[in-house]
Amino acid sequence: MTKPAISFEFFPPQNLEASFRLWDTVQTLAPLDPRFVSVTYGAGGTTRELTRDAVATLHKSSGLNVAAHLTCVNATRDATLQIAQDFAAAGVSDIVALRGDPPKGSANFEPHPEGFANSVELIEALAQTGDFNIRVGAYPDTHPEAASAQADIDWLKRKIDAGASEAITQFFFEADTFLRFRDACAKAGIEAPIIPGILPIENWKGTRNFARRCGTDIPQWLEDAFTKAERDDRSDLLATALCTELCSDLMEEGVDSLHFYTLNRPELTRDVCHALGVVPRITLENVA
């Protein structure tokens, strides 16, 4: 089985300690030669400047292909496009374009009066500049705000048609969830690559709560497995084994790219990549 192309998602740091953690994460995972790495936005656009600064710094100092998340929450069209042009000026031409989550305390997304109404409008505006390679989000489990699974797929097609080159999915726990979604997308005429988003489970309680907020289906067998593993103090071993198995199952079905949500904690992601045959590049410098 051919080893997959990989990519990683990072959080922008919000304090000095987090800055060191991000840099340690980059140093740990960069030798695995990712196709790209992405840097997120906080809910409600709360890390807009932090994301911009982290993207520019990573691009300049790491040698990695950095993709910047960009949302249209709590910002005018002009302000959003100015952030995009700041990325371009820093040499960053990859953007993950998302509508964005509502600010904390808000139940629903409310467009800024002078802002983009949704992700499709944002993608269209970015595409018209001709400056960016645009990626978008996709949802194998139905998005909590979507009317149906088919509505999610129809909306993804609109985003691709608006100018996106590929999609990255929300995380999921079973390979069949992604494979059914991939088949449904193909049936809907979506030809752009769809990259499965993989979340190594660092902490089951936190992951479970996050999954519930995202509408991600939680299989009972997974709940039972982590309950037993936590009792036996074997959670890390279980997490590594399950994530590796999930990725292997996807690869056996023709998936050739994987996007890991690292949470700026690289060890589990690194171990899974190693198990899949993705190991640091060997160069003359390494062996000198």
Image (cartoon, rainbow, N blue to C red):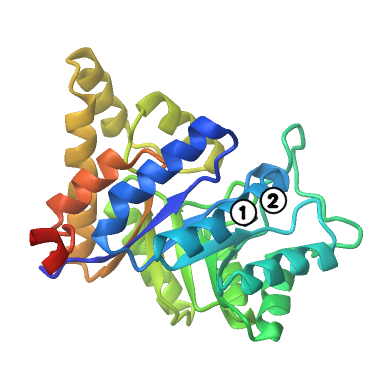
Give left or right: position of 264 versus 45: left
- State the separation of the CA atoms marked 2 and 1: 6 Å
The amino acid type, in three-letter code, at marker 1 is: Asp
Determine the secondary structure under disc 2.
Answer: helix
Labels 2 & 1 near each other (Cβ < 8 A): yes
Q: Nearer the viewer, residue 76 or 186?
A: 76
Q: Is residue 75 left or right of residue 159?
A: right
Along the line of sight, which residue is nearer the eye, 231 or 94? Answer: 94
44 in relation to 91, above or below = above
Residue 113: percent from left, percent from top? 91, 58
Using the rendered view, name the quadrant where residue 196 is placed. Answer: bottom left
42 horizontally vs 263: left or right: right
Q: Residue at x 73, y 77 (%)?
A: 125
Task: Assign the N terminus to one quadrant of the image.
Answer: bottom left
Q: Say what secondary structure mark 1 lies in.
A: helix
* Residue sitting nearer the eye, 262 or 245: 262
Q: Is residue 140 visible?
A: no
Q: Residues within 10 Å of mark 2 (few under 14, many from 20)?
A: few
The amino acid type, in three-letter code, at marker 2 is Glu
Identify residue for label 1: 53
The circle on residue 2 is none
Name the residue rendered at 60%, 46% in the picture: 144
Report x, y in % for residue 164.
56, 77
User: Residue 57: image x %, image y %?
Assistant: 53, 57
Q: Which residue is mark 2?
A: 49
Where is residue 224, by image quadrant?
top left
Q: Residue at x 66, y 73 (%)?
A: 123
Most distant residue in the top direction: 231
The one nearer the camera, 77 or 167, is 77
